[in-house]
Image: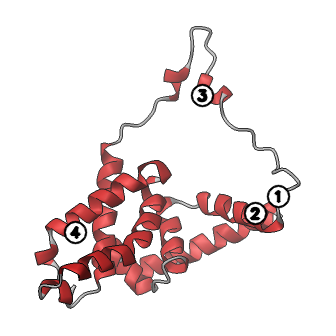
C-alpha cells in the first residue's frame, strides 16, 4: 500500500492478487459459495474507492477482510429468507424436500484423501458461521487470533472462545463420522 500511495500503480494489482484467495475463502465462510464472488468483487471495489482512507499503521489484509466482513453482512441482511412452504404443490407435497440429495455414503472408489476432505468439509459446515470463519481464518489464512479479533471487531477472548467451541464441535463431528 505504501508503494501505491507513493505512485506505483502496479503495486495495487500485486496487492489485490496476493489477497484475493483469502477474501474468497473468507466470503464463502460468511455468505456461501453462491454469493462469495459477488461479495469479493464488491469488497475490492470498496477497497479501491477508499484507498486514501487506509491507515498505513495497520495491515492491509486486516483492513481488506474487515471490509469483506461488512460487505458480506450487508448482503445477508438484504437477502430475503426462503419460506419452504412456497415449494408445496397443489397436492401438499414439498418439491424442495423431495429434491434434496440423499445422505448415502460416498462411492467406494473414492480415495481416502477425498473421504477425509469430505468429512472435514461436513464437520466445518456443522459449525456456526462465526465459529467456522474463525477456524478458516486461523488455519487457511494462518492468521493469529488477535488478527481475527481485529477483523471481526471483537475481543480476543471472544475469538478464543469461538475457536475452542469450534474445535470441540469439530472433534465431536469427526468422532461421530468415524
The Cα atoms of the two marked residues, 3 and 2, are separated by 28 Å
Q: Residue 110 carries which label?
A: 1
> In the image, 131: left or right of 39?
right
Other-residue count near label 4 (Cα within 10 Å), few / some / many at <14 / 14–19 / ≥20? some
* Residue at (40% x, 86% y) in the render: 146
| Mark 2 burial class by Cα count in 10 Å: few <14, some 14-19, many 20+ | few
Specify which label sits upstream in the sequence, 1 or 3.
3
Q: Which residue is drawn at 64% across and 29% down?
A: 97
Percent of width and height locating residue 37? 40, 55
Residue visible at 79% across and 60% down in the picture: 177
Which residue has dot 2 on it? 114
Quadrant housing the C terminus: bottom right
Query: Mark 4 vs mark 2: which is more N-terminal?
Result: 4
- Give the residue number, with chain letter if any, for mark 3: 96
Q: Is residue 166 above or below residue 35?
A: below
Give the SS element for disc 1: loop
Residue 21 appears left or right of 45:
right
Q: Which of disc 1 and disc 4 is earlier in sequence?
A: 4
Amino acid at each position: 500500500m505504501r508503494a501505491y500511495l507513493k505512485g506505483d500503480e502496479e503495486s495495487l494489482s500485486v496487492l489485490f492478487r496476493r489477497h484475493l484467495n483469502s477474501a474468497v475463502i473468507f466470503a464463502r465462510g460468511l455468505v456461501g459459495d453462491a454469493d462469495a464472488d459477488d461479495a469479493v468483487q464488491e469488497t475490492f471495489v470498496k477497497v479501491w474507492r477508499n484507498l486514501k482512507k487506509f491507515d498505513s499503521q495497520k495491515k492491509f489484509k486486516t483492513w481488506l477482510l474487515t471490509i469483506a466482513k461488512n460487505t458480506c453482512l450487508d448482503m445477508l441482511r438484504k437477502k430475503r429468507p426462503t419460506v419452504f412452504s412456497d415449494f408445496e404443490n397443489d397436492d401438499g407435497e414439498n418439491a424442495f424436500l423431495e429434491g434434496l440429495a440423499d445422505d448415502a455414503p460416498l462411492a467406494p472408489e473414492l480415495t481416502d484423501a477425498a473421504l477425509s476432505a469430505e468429512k472435514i468439509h461436513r464437520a466445518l459446515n456443522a459449525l456456526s458461521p462465526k465459529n467456522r470463519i474463525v477456524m478458516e481464518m486461523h488455519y487457511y489464512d494462518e492468521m493469529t487470533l488477535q488478527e481475527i479479533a481485529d477483523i471481526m471487531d471483537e475481543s480476543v477472548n471472544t475469538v478464543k472462545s469461538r475457536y475452542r467451541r469450534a474445535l470441540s464441535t469439530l472433534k465431536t463431528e469427526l468422532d461421530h463420522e468415524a
